[in-house]
């Protein structure tokens, strides 16, 4: 409850909600219900005025009526005018999509209980209405979940805002922001609409009215959908499945691009039936590869990089064959496309097989890319291959890359320091103390971390 109170949208409404919560905890149940209704009315009024200020022509008439009533103050005419406004508030909230009809019904119950609390004469036989504590708590929870924690843009408008956000030239795929703005703080029905909207555009590459290339727009929608899946995977799975029939008849290139977007996501592969999997497999098998000294086309590299996904490998058995059959440089390009634990063994092999200084530096750079996925064992294996292969050990950029690798393996903790110390000892046995290729910068990094390789070697 306190977490929800902290999420109340209106800063002027939040003190009322906090007061209602204090009343509940103090046992002032009538006051809790009355203050909850006060928070509801204040919230709806604030949001409708905000919509009017933002240019909603239909909300302008409400703002005008509110201003006229406020000008009359506490006069009889002013009180009657405000009572009329309050009586229609929930209908207005439904009209402007702040709540739906079910939410209106739940909030109407709060208003009825508020009237009983504020007007005990409404009950016959001289009895005074005695609200139960759990009723007050339930009313406050309903108000928070249904209305108070949501911004004043719902339904069609929030979908439009989501679409504008995706097409923003300064779009940044920040998962927490997308989740908070377009998932956590919108109503359930709107949430489903946004997820369905994102699924349709992520899969079908629909032109967003020329604001972006369709494929790039789908890439961004896919990122949003993956963010939403972290909140409710089954909702996303359902939305993806609903697009299955339309996805089945897309051109092959679009289907392959969608597979790349969602290669790591189980909810996508659960939609792929055997017929579609067969088609995807045939397309992967037919991907052309240039001669070894020419770079692999990005689309081809991205498609073969699906080999990292256990879901893709299970459905498309040709992926591993295509990857292992590639030349050294092309396999390097695939692993660079999407660093993943799957490629660690191949990266270690790159270090072992590098046949020139340039190839050694390429292998070193991709090893640094994969540093977050290394274990102590694979780190030791990679460093052994590094010092044993003179093309790696004496390539110009390798001393700097060794420092980056040490920094990139911080997840391994202090256990990694002796492994790097052993590497230094082996290198210096070949190159001599104090030379550039004895990796003095790595020794300095180890010392700064609290490990002295010279002392450890004695």
Image: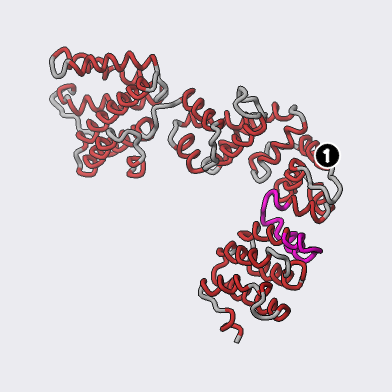
Element marked by disc 1? helix
- Relative to 447, is 84 above or below? above
The image quadrant of residue 365 is bottom right
- Relative to 331, is 43 above or below? above
**Is 269 covered by the magenta stretch?**
no
- Relative to 56, is 242 above or below? below
The C terminus sits in image quarter: bottom right
The residue to which callout 1 is attached is 282
The image quadrant of residue 252 is top right
Which residue is at the front of the view, 446 or 232?
446
Which residue is at the front of the view, 449 or 6?
449
The N terminus sits in image quarter: top left
Pointer 1: residues within 10 angstroms few (<14), some, or many (20+)? Answer: few
Residue 330 in percent (x, y) is at 79, 51
Which residue is at the front of the view, 205 or 240?
205
Magenta-tinted stretch: 335-361
Residue 251 in percent (x, y) is at 76, 29
Describe residue 223's horizontal placement relative to residue 336 as left or right: left
| Residue drawn at the location 32% of the way across and 24% of the way down | 108
Residue 19 in percent (x, y) is at 23, 38
The image quadrant of residue 408 is bottom right
**Is 359 covered by the magenta stretch?**
yes
Q: Residue furthest bottom?
A: 458
Residue 245 in percent (x, y) is at 70, 27
| Residue drawn at the location 61% of the way across and 32% of the way down | 199
Q: Residue furthest front?
A: 435
């Amino acid at each position: 409850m306190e977490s929800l109170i902290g999420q109340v949208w209106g800063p002027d409404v939040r003190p009322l909600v906090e007061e209602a919560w204090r009343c509940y905890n103090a046992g002032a149940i009538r006051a809790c219900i009355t203050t909850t209704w006060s928070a509801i009315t204040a919230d709806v009024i604030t949001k409708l005025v905000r919509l009017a200020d933002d240019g909603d022509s239909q909300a302008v008439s409400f703002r005008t009526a509110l201003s006229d009533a406020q000008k009359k103050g506490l006069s009889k005419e002013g009180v009657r005018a405000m009572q009329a406004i309050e009586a229609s508030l929930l209908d207005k909230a439904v009209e402007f999509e702040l709540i739906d009809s079910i939410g209106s019904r739940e909030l109407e119950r709060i208003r009825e209980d508020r009237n009983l609390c504020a007007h005990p004469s409404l009950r016959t036989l001289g009895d005074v209405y005695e609200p139960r504590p759990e009723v007050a708590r339930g009313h406050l929870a309903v108000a928070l979940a249904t209305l108070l924690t949501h911004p004043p843009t719902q339904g069609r408008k929030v979908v439009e805002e989501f679409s504008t956000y995706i097409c923003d030239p300064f779009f940044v795929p920040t998962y927490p922001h997308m989740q908070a703005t377009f998932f956590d703080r919108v109503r359930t029905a709107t949430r489903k609409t946004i997820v369905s909207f994102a699924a349709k555009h992520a899969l079908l590459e629909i032109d967003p009215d020329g604001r972006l290339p369709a494929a790039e727009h789908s890439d961004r929608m896919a990122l949003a959908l993956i963010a939403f899946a972290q909140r409710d995977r089954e909702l996303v799975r359902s939305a993806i499945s609903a697009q299955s029939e339309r996805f089945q008849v897309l051109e092959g290139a679009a289907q392959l691009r969608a597979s790349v977007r969602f290669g790591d996501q189980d909810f996508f592969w659960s939609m792929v039936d055997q017929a579609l999997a067969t088609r995807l497999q045939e397309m992967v098998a037919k991907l052309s590869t240039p001669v070894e000294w020419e770079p692999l086309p990005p689309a081809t590299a991205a498609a073969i990089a699906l080999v990292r996904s256990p879901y893709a490998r299970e459905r498309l058995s040709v992926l591993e064959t295509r990857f292992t059959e590639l030349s050294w440089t092309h396999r390097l390009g695939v692993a660079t496309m999407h660093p993943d634990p799957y490629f660690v063994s191949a990266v270690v092999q790159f270090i072992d097989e590098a046949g020139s200084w340039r190839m050694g530096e390429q292998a070193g750079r991709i090893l640094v890319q994969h540093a977050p996925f290394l274990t102590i064992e694979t780190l030791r294996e990679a460093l052994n291959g590094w010092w044993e292969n003179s093309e790696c050990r004496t390539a110009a950029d390798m001393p700097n890359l060794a420092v980056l690798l040490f920094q990139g393996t911080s997840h391994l903790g202090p256990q990694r320091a002796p492994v790097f110390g052993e590497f230094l000892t082996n290198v210096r046995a070949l190159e001599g103390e104090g030379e550039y290729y004895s990796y003095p910068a790595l020794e300095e990094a180890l010392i700064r971390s609290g490990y002295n390789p010279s002392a450890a070697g004695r």
